[in-house]
Each structure stands twice: as structure tokens, then as C-alpha cells.
Amino acid sequence: MLYLSNSKIWRVSFLKILVVGGGGREHALVRKISESPKVREIHCMPGNAGIAAQGVCCRQIKAVDIPAIIDYAYKNAFDLVVVGPDDPLAMGLVDALEAQGIPAFGPSKSAAVIEYSKVFAKELMLRHGIPTAGHKSFDCHEAAVEYIRGLGSWPAVIKADGLALGKGVIIARNEAEALDTLRQMMKERVFGEGGTNVVIEEFLTGPEVSVLAFCDGKTVVPMVSSMDHKRAYDGDTGPNTGGMGTIAPNPHYTPELAQRCMGEIFLPTLRAMQAEGCPFKGCLYFGLMLTAQGPKVIEYNCRFGDPETQVVLPLLESDIVDIMLAVRDGKLDEVDVKWRDGAAACVVMASGGYPGSYRTGLPIEGLDATGQLPAGKAEIYHAGTCKDEQGRFLTAGGRVLGVTAIGSSLTEALEIAYDAVDLVSFEEAHYRRDVGAAALGRPLLPV
């Protein structure tokens, strides 16, 4: 059996796929890709200890080392390269791969700007009538300070224009906090060049919803909705992180809201990108706020979310490789994307101190014990792990593990996920105990 693409023909039972990245998102992508009967070999760079333990060939090449990735992909004749993180997308990895005749899943550099420039994204929405928060953009610290001092209502949202590892959004409760944030971003450059420009937005209220969507430039197919937990501590307190847990589907996201978002946000965004000369192909992440005035866009990401991917992909019933190839070839409308019933939950186990400073190299115990849980219900995705010479798993990052479970209901999925968390341990491990509580109408736990 053959698969015909715009550029080459694949024998569907012999596909070689390279996944770029090394976090929990990439582990979830590798796991879902490995379920495809069309795939015979998966490589990952740099990968992590959990991905390698799955029998995947991991190469210690950084995701931002574009020349090395191109060289490896060309020499190994991969049939598809899946790019996970934002940095290599913003650097033009997909463009560089395609220029060498290597098929890739992910947006071009010109399309990835929808994430790596908050200013571009806000202006895009303004030009094309896509609902979002009111805002002002600044490249001058003094002008931003003057604007802050003239604000009449608080809190306010301050965003670094560029990429900031998911931490470049600050909710300032008052003028003093806002001025301190501007100083750190624009003067001290805590986010490097990402804070050269800033966006100051009105503060929106309402339930938050994350919707990932497959896009091929003209067709958009939303995935199961999810709810992320960005704050570090119970009670939805503490600093913003890359994500401390997530659930899917999001109970606030009704079929009626989904239809409204398709008409007011998803399709208009895809058409706007076409009109701007940078059609989007890949996975487009819509961060939404369900306000009293209707759904509004908080942010776009140009790739699979992390940890949203860890709960969305386990609910995908269709072959993800078929979908990715169709996205790349502009034939997404020819694929039937199906989802399984039920719910999924992910609890992130992080290093003590994250998102600030933390220790690494701490032994992880109990990873094999999750076999005690119902078969096919629990999965542990490695985000920041490595192995020592004795073969022990060690912590190697801020977010260490994404303990994920699926169930017939959200309540069941959360129970299984937390049962799995109880079986795993490492020194100074930190995780939120109230993931999914708000979705179930339960009170958030106190810090």
C-alpha cells in the first residue's frame, strides 16, 4: 500500500519519523505516533530518558541546533519530521527542512510569528475583527510607564512580546507591580530580547479554555478542548509556570460555544493568516477566555501545548500520522478525525522551587509501580528526566513528569491520576493537589 504526497511516495508500513524536542509534549507525540501501523521507526532529538525507554532512538542534538538537525534528517532519510517546541519553529526549522526536500509537520517561520510576537498577534486580531482583550503595545520603557500611571483600573496584564518559556505573562495587581514588571522586562531583560517590546492588556475574567487545532492553511479541525493550570500552587496561586496540570474535555466549552468559536475565532484566524501571506500549517493553539461578552482570544501558540497534549492525544482515536501527512499536504478535509469518549487528566510533578531555581539529579522511585493501576488507564510522560550509569531515572528539569490518566468521566480520570502520583516519588517533588477541582465545581485547595 502506498501513500502519495506532493513530493514523494511512502510505503505506509515503512515510515521513519523524527520528533524534535525533549519534553512531556514530545513524549506524548512519540507515544501517539508509535500507535500508527504505518510507522516502523521513530527517532527523537534530544528526547529524554522516558522516550528512550520506549525504544526510541534519542540523539543528543538540541532542538535549536538547526544545521545539525537538517544534517541528521537528510542523512537518515526521514519521511516526516515533527517539530514540537516553539523555538525551532520561530527559527525556521520547518522551512529549512522543506528546502532540503524533507517533509515536516509544523508552521513556517512566517506563520510561527503568531506566537513569537505578541504584538503581531494582537494587531492581526485587530485588523481582522477577531475578539480579544483591549491592549496597547510599547517598545519604549518610558512610554509604557506613562501609560501604566494613567490606568484607572486594576489588575492589568503585561506580556513580553517574544518567547519566554511560557512565563512571559504577568498579572499586575496594582501600579507598583506593573512598574516593577516593566523594569524587569524592558530594562533588566529577564526574558532577553523577548521583553524588548511589551503588550499591556485589559484584564479579562471568565473560564479559560485551551483548544488545539489541526490546520492545513485552509481547513481547521479543532481537537478536544482542555483546561490548563498555569499557577504553581494550590488555590490557583503563585507564579505562572509552563503548566502544572490539565484536564480534557473542558466542561465550560459547550457545543454551542464550539460552534461560535469556529465562526468568530478559528476560521477567521486561519483566513487572516492567509490574507497576511503566511498561511498556517500545523497545530495552532487557541488560548480562550469565556467572558460575559463572549469568547475572546488570550493568546495563540504555533504548536502543541504542554501539558495539554498529554490529555488531548490520548483521546484521539484516528491515526495521527494520517492527520499530520494530510496537514502537510493541504488535504486535511479528506481525513475523518475521530475522538474517543471519556476524559483525561494530567498532574505535573515538578522539582521543588519550580518555576524558580531547583535541584536536579534526584532519583525517581516508583515508576514501575503504576502497573498496579487499571490497564490502559494511566500513563507517565517524562518531561525532565535522565538516567545515571546504574540505569536509575533522575530528575533533569523543572517539570519532571506528567502523570496522566483516562477514564469514563473526569472524576475517574483524576482519581486514577492521583493514585498514580501517590506511587511515584522523588525528593522535593511538588505538584498541585487541586487539578480539575474548578471544573468539577469543587473549591480550590488552600496553599
Image (spheres, rainbow, N blue to C red):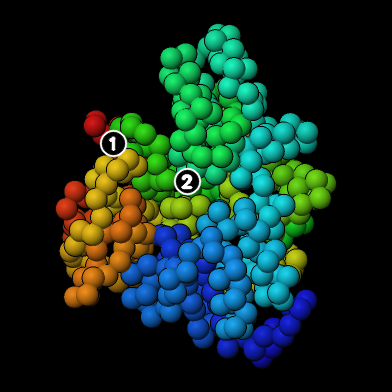
Q: 408 or 207, which is in the foreground?
A: 207
Q: Which mark is residue 234?
A: 1
Residue 290 lies, in percent from the top left, at 55, 33
With 138 as the anchor, is 207 left or right in this view?
Answer: left
Query: Do residues under tags 1 and 2 come within 8 Å of each other at their CB atoms?
Result: no
Q: Which mark is residue 269?
A: none
With 219 as the anchor, is 362 left or right in this view?
Answer: left
Residue located 72% across and 52% down the image: 110
Question: Which type of secondary structure does the marked residue at label 2 adopt?
Answer: loop
Residue 40 lies, in percent from the top left, at 51, 86
Residue 446 lies, in percent from the top left, at 24, 30
- Measured in 3D between alpha carbons, the distance from the residue under mark 1 to the one under mark 2, in whole angstroms, is 21 Å
Residue located 29% across and 71% down the image: 375
Residue 27 lies, in percent from the top left, at 42, 66
Q: Residue furthest front?
A: 188
Q: Does the image show residue 211?
A: yes
Residue located 67% across and 47% down the image: 113
Q: Residue furthest bottom?
A: 1
The amino acid type, in three-letter code, at marker 1 is: Asp
The amino acid type, in three-letter code, at marker 2 is: Leu
- State which quadrant residue 405 falls in: bottom left
With 227 as the anchor, is 379 left or right in this view?
Answer: left
Q: Which residue is mark 2?
A: 165
Question: Which type of secondary structure does the marked residue at label 1 adopt?
Answer: loop
Instruction: Note whether 137 is above or below 112 in the view shown.
Output: above
Instruction: Note whether 7 is above or below 429 in the view shown.
Output: below
Badge 1 or badge 2: first in the primary sequence: 2
Q: Does the image show residue 151?
A: no
Q: The C terminus lies in which quarter of the figure?
A: top left
Residue located 67% across and 75% down the image: 102
Q: What crowding class fits label 2: few (fewer than 14 Cα within 10 Å), some (14-19), or many (20 or more)?
A: few
